[in-house]
Image: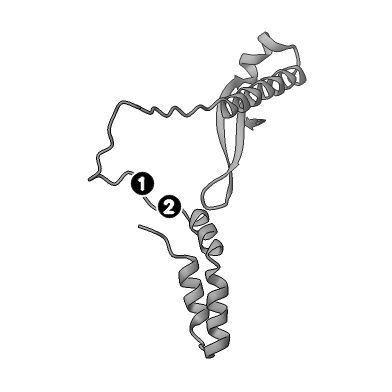
């Protein structure tokens, strides 16, 4: 996080902003906290603008530390009940996942089977078969 100043003809304002990359891949920034104007901050934090700027940088450092702690301390709670029976008519798991299926695919050596079929029978479509089998997902 960093300190951003905004000057107008009436006052100079101090903000703490955070930069990030949004979903579209564009770098943007958002204001986290408004510290105040220079006129408001001079009596509290120093006789000069440099003293106010030093205080603002310290506040930005503190906000950065708070943000990092919040990011590290996220917890996820999962509850399991050993005494509850499963409903066999209800689907509980969906889509096993690509990496799980890929490991089974290569343990069964399906890629070698497709390659041997292509060499032995001179098929042109076995590479497509290999791709389809490799990316197959269980519903």
Q: Which residue shows up at 56% across the image and 25% down it?
A: 73
**Disc 2, SS:** loop
> Is disc 1 surrounded by few (<14), some (14 to 19) or many (20+) residues within 10 Å?
few
Q: Is residue 114 left or right of residue 80?
A: right
Q: How far across and down, in percent of the image, does residue 106 sit?
A: 56, 63
Q: Nearer the viewer, residue 55 or 7?
A: 55
Q: How is the image coloured?
A: one colour
Q: Which mark is residue 93?
A: 1
- Give the residue pinned by disc 2: 96
Q: Is residue 75 left or right of residue 94?
A: right
Quadrant housing residue 11 = top right
> Is disc 2 surrounded by few (<14), some (14 to 19) or many (20+) residues within 10 Å?
few
Q: CA distance from mark 1 to mark 2?
A: 8 Å
- The reply to whether discs 1 and 2 touch (Cβ–Cβ < 8 Å) is yes
The number of discs equals 2
Q: Is residue 62 left or right of residue 88?
A: right
Q: Which residue shows up at 62% across the image and 32% down it?
A: 6
Quadrant housing residue 62 = top right
Q: Nearer the viewer, residue 54 or 120?
A: 120
Q: Nearer the viewer, residue 132 or 81?
A: 81
User: Does residue 45 appear in the picture of this structure?
Assistant: yes
The residue at the far top in this view is 44
Screen quadrant of the C terminus: bottom left
The residue at the far bottom in this view is 122
Q: How far across and down, in percent of the image, does residue 134 sit?
A: 50, 67
Screen quadrant of the N terminus: top right
Rendered position, 134 above or below 126: above
Q: Which residue shows up at 58% across the image and 86% down it?
A: 119
User: Does residue 13 appear in the picture of this structure?
Assistant: no
Q: Nearer the viewer, residue 118 or 28?
A: 118
Q: Which mark is residue 72?
A: none
**Disc 1, SS:** loop
């Amino acid at each position: 996080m960093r300190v951003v100043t905004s000057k107008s003809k009436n006052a100079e304002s101090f903000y703490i902003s955070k930069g990030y990359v949004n979903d579209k891949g564009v770098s943007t920034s958002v204001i986290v906290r408004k510290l105040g104007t220079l006129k408001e901050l001079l009596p509290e934090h120093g006789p000069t603008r440099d003293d106010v700027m030093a205080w603002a940088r310290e506040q930005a450092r503190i906000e950065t530390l708070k943000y990092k702690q919040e990011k590290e301390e996220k917890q996820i709670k999962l509850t399991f009940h050993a005494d509850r029976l499963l409903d066999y008519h209800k689907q509980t798991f969906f889509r096993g996942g690509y990496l799980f299926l890929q490991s089974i695919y290569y343990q069964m050596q399906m890629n070698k089977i497709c390659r041997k079929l292509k060499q032995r029978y001179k098929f042109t479509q076995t590479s497509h078969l290999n791709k389809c089998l490799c990316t197959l997902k269980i519903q």
